[in-house]
Amino acid sequence: MYGFKTLLYKEILRFWKVLLQTVMAPVLTALLYLLIFASVLKEHVQVYPGVSYTAFLMPGLIMMSLLQNAFANGSSSLIQSKQNGNIVFVLLPPISNFEFFAAYLIASIVRGLVVGLGVLLVGLLFTKLDIAHPVWVLVFALLAGAAFSALGIVAGIWADKYDHIAGVQNFIIMPLTFLSGVFYSIHALPPFWQAISHYNPVFFMIDGFRYGFHGVSDVDPWLSMAVVLPVALVLSWIPLQLIRTGYKLRS
């Protein structure tokens, strides 16, 4: 496992060395969303009884930041290594396919969790946020982080240049996260758009995560788990197969 530990350390150190860019900048972005939406809507919107709009918004912002940064870590690392030509130094050592995948996956999850924790700590300066079910919070954070970390690895393997990564972020990641109930309850939507939201797995990630904080949600947390767990497993299986075949890595 020495190779796995070394690669994992290298990947964590990669984003930790530029903490201002990889952690502080996303936290600041989430803070701006919080200040703008909360200041405008907190006196006019109450989604759940006894839960202020600011408190409702916080879990969504935490999860959105976690997902976006979990995706960004693996995708940016792999495309950077491919562009610079140093991916060969990762492929040559006797590291198994699973160790290769696990190192990138865990490092990406760590970055997502660090950013999410930063957003949580900053948010506590503006609102009181209780955690009704800590286990649900942790489970959905880990599963959702794993799903988007794996998706980031897929994007990093598939992409030939940074524009491809930007395209995935702009046309897939951003719409999925922004249209998932971060800023609103889907019960505020017309019936057609409520039905469409149920085809967005990110909605279930955020809704289950929000249940862990407030004890209330738009759908049953077990239903959210039944959606998120298979999504995480499938998205983890895909990069393992790509790494095993050497797609755009060894050929």
Image (cartoon, rainbow, N blue to C red):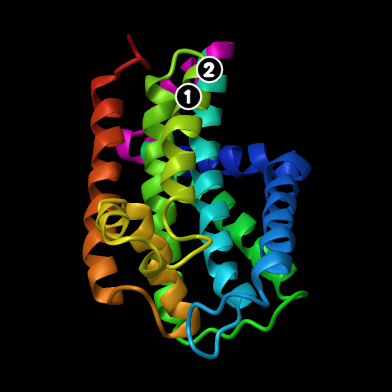
Q: Which residue is mark 1?
A: 167
Number of other residues with Cα within 10 Å of mark 2, as a class: few under 14, some 14 to 19, many 20 or more: few
Quadrant of the rendering where the N terminus is positioned: top left
Please tell me which residue lies in front, 19 or 202. Answer: 202
Instruction: Identify the element where label 2 is drawn.
Output: helix
Q: Position of residue 154 (x, y in %)?
A: 36, 31
Dividing the image into 4 quarters, which one contains the C terminus? top left
Which of 251 and 123 lies nearest the eye of the viewer?
123
What SS does tag 1 mark? helix
Q: Position of residue 110 (x, y in %)?
A: 55, 53
Q: Residue at x 68, y 42 (%)?
A: 22
Residue 188, placed above or below residue 23: below
Identity of the amino acid at label 2?
Asp
210 shown above or below 155:
below
Image location of residue 247, percent across then percent down: 29, 18
The answer to whether the residue labelled 1 contacts the one labelled 2, judged by CB atoms less than 8 Å apart, is: yes
Name the residue carrying label 2: 163
Q: Quadrant of residue 57?
A: bottom right
Magenta part of the chain? 83-100
- Residue 239 relative to residue 148: left or right: left
